[in-house]
Amino acid sequence: MPRALNVKQLVEYVRRCAELASALEVSGWPKPGNVHRSRSRDGTRFEHFIAGSIALGSAIRDAALRGVMAARGRVQLSKLGVGRLIRRAVMDVLSSHHGGNTHLGICLLFIPLSIASTKTYIERGGFEEDVLRRNIDNVIRSTIPIDTINVYRAIATANPPSRMGRVIYGRAPDLYDSSAKMKILRDGINLYDVMLESSSYDNIARELVTCMEISFEYGFRYLIETFESTKDINTAIVHTFLRILSMFPDTFIARSVGLKIESDIRRAVEVGVKETLWVSIEAGMILDLGGLTTDRGRDALWRFDEKLHSLGREYNPGTTADLTASSLMIALLNGLRF
């Protein structure tokens, strides 16, 4: 990590780390079931993800600048505009290509991470992990109902109702409830409230109410260890993806499979996790075989990729890809070079 960054350099550094993390994530090859350099899915290509990785940079830059302002006491945490920044990032990505929703999860993770990163650097002169995670938590907890409304709009724009299921009960209204805005404002529901309710069935939401536990404690650490042992960034990315997938069943897959049986999102994911647990088991077995570092591991990995793609769009570990990207951004912020 460069030393003694001024504000302009710091903001640009965070933006560059975010864009590079997003581009590196999709460049990991092969991440089984995902779009990658030799696989497209339902009209979405590798190049669409590269375009989106660059398009989200403008919103990241502004998020990073807001973090600086918060650290200096020039803006209250509740006035950061987290939801607006997330919505803007999502819209910028969608307008950059015709490949559909490529970066929703990354936008949800990267905006608060970017705000917290610059805030932490200004406060501590670096990206000290405990402080960074605490700042992420403070950013999410300090959101206000208008942030929730903007995030609802972003998610609804990026996804049709058929892919999201229905929220049958709970304080937070369903995404597509025509009176959602009124209920959010009436009940004072902030982004933390929504993510906490969603955390039992969505691992992106879980990240946002656990100070990004998976990214920091599992993804980032394993990524650095693997890169140091292999000196190969592609191997480090793919193995980190497999590691996260082996430990945390992918909630995008679980939701997609479960919604064929249940419309209630909670029940759908519960059913989907049981139906697709074999995906996590197989990811772990491939790592046990050595993954990309052995012939047997490589053969098993390619067979796994073929199998997931043959099963259709439901079997795309998209949440795992997003968590791999956030793990990469943390590593890059902390000086990873390859």
Image: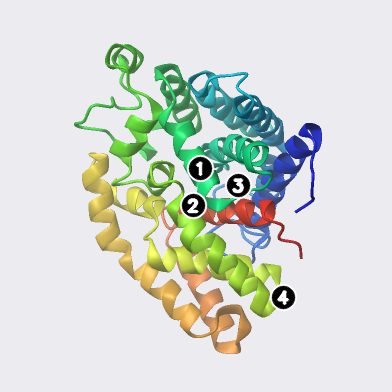
How far across and down, in percent of the image, does residue 284 sit?
43, 75
- Foreground label between 1 and 4: 4
**Dot 4 or dot 2, earlier in sequence:** 4
Query: In the visual, does 183 lie left or right of 147?
Result: left
Q: Residue furthest left?
A: 169
Q: Residue at x 39, y 18 (%)?
A: 145
The residue pinned by badge 3 equals 44
Label 2: state its secondary structure: helix
Give the color scheme: rainbow, by chain, secondary structure or one colour.
Answer: rainbow
The residue type indicated by label 3 comes to: Thr
**How far across and how far down the image is residue 113, in percent?**
56, 41
Q: CA distance from mark 2 to mark 3?
A: 13 Å
Q: Earlier in the sequence, mark 3 or mark 4?
A: 3
Circle 1 sits on which residue?
105
Q: Amino acid at mark 2?
A: Gly
Question: Mark 1 or mark 4, which has the lower sequence index?
Answer: 1
In the image, what residue type sits under mark 1?
Gly
For residue 154, above or below residue 326 = above
Residue underneath mark 4: 231
Left or right of residue 319, residue 234 in this image: right
3 and 4 marks in contact (CB < 8 Å): no
Q: Is residue 145 visible?
A: yes
Q: For the residues labelled 1 and 2, say whether their Cβ atoms are less than 8 Å apart.
A: yes
Pick the front one: 285 or 204: 204
The circle on residue 318 is: 2
Q: Secondary structure at mark 3?
A: loop
